[in-house]
Amino acid sequence: MAIDKVRIGVIGVGGMGSGHCARMHEVAEAQLTCVCDTDPEAARAASEKYKVPAYARAGDLLRSRLVDAVIIATPHYFHPPIAIEAFKRRIHVLSEKPIGVTVSAADRMIAAAEASGCVFSVMYQMRASGHAQLARRIIAEGKIGEIYRTSMVVGWYRSQAYYNSGGWRATWTGEGGGVLINQAPHFLDLYAWLGGMPVRLRGETRTRLHDIEVEDEAFATLEYANGAHGYLYASTTESPGYEQIEICGDLGKVLLQGSSIRVWVNKQPVSEHARNASEMWGSPGSEEIAVAVPEGSGSHQEITRNFCKAIIKGEPLIAPGAEGLWAVELINGLILSSKTGKEVSLPVDRVRYDRLLARLKRSSREKTVVTGVRETDPQHQ
């Protein structure tokens, strides 16, 4: 049956989900029809504010017949089981990042989506920004040539008060990691979307400043199938914050910094000049070119709108759920490499990582300080 508006239920309204509810009216193709949260107060508040039914359990919402689709904004471990149950009921899914904590759980989620024929998207809204779309097009069209090097540096800041706000935060049992699983996925996704996936990596994680059991700093060197190399770094220990993704090729370079993009093109391919130049101190020559950045703010609403249009009329997804696996592969691979002290090949060995995480969860300790403060990141309100 053809529809012109998608009935959406939001599962998890105490954090990011509250923002999705608040912005739903900005998407003409979407209608908020119900909410769900295990916290009775959060569920009641959202129900009263938006005049929709509230449920304490995701299963009850999925059985309600009030939804065509759901946005899953729960703690990470719950994304796959809720999504899989939704797909069994032929309900479309837009998952917050990451799609799962482990590659094995993400695999099951993707398989369930494919079997159901439902639309599956992930909230990687940075893909929808004009500068990211332009960078993707420049690279895809071959304007910087074969990729030689990639780098990603993301330095954010989080206080101990942030980590103390929830018992699940920054624990192996509650979150499945630290900066990699929480703050870095948007950038890891963009990094892989632009530069491709490596075939192996060697990584290290550290807990530098915070009283947490998981990492607040992570870094890795990467190798790609064509011999190119990469480097990535992520932390919650830097102020002021910094975000950069750089993709370098035979014909030029693309640099994303925050919400800006810079592009350089070489007058001669590096590979050609290196072999044939007669001048001792010569160079291929390069120039920065002016670029027209297309529209696109990189907002949550853009991904929600695209998700709804995919359901209504088959519009191609900006962030397909299956591509949500990329960030999880990088996260699991980096943690596995750090804990074993060895290089890891990608795709990650599913069984090996599951065993490692099980061991880390057994070592998890209960937090002694939990404030219970539930606030959405002001950057995403």
Image (spheres, rainbow, N blue to C red):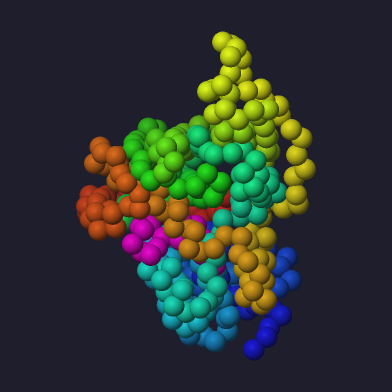
Q: Nearer the viewer, residue 165 or 209?
A: 209
- In the picture as drawn, the residue positioned furthest to the top comes out as 280
**How far from the left and from the top, in percent, is residue 380?**
62, 52
Q: Quick one: quadrant of the C terminus? A: bottom right
Tell me if residue 288 comes above or below residue 348 in the rendering.
above
**Residue 21 shows in this picture:** no
Snapshot quadrant of residue 81? bottom left
In the visual, does 136 lie left or right of 165?
right
**How far from the left and from the top, in percent, is residue 341?**
25, 37
Q: Specify whether residue 106 is painted magenta.
A: yes
Bounds of the magenta segment: 94-107
Tell me if residue 268 comes above or below residue 83 in the rendering.
above
**Residue 221 shows in this picture:** yes
Q: Nearer the viewer, residue 94 or 48?
A: 94
Q: Identify the residue at image location x=68%, y=46%.
A: 134
Snapshot quadrant of residue 282? top right
**How far from the left and from the top, in percent, is residue 320?**
54, 63
Q: Identify the residue at image location x=52%, y=44%.
A: 195
- In the picture as drawn, the residue positioned furthest to the bottom comes out as 1
| Count of residue discs | 0
In the visual, does 301 lie left or right of 110?
right
Snapshot quadrant of residue 45? bottom right
Q: Identify the residue at image location x=48%, y=63%.
A: 322
Tell me if residue 1 comes above or below residue 353 in the rendering.
below
Q: Nearer the viewer, residue 167 or 309?
A: 309
Q: Quick one: quadrant of the N terminus? A: bottom right
Q: Identify the residue at image location x=65%, y=54%.
A: 128
Tell me if residue 317 comes above or below residue 204 in the rendering.
below
Q: Specify whether residue 311 is painted magenta.
A: no
Q: Nearer the viewer, residue 224 or 164?
A: 224
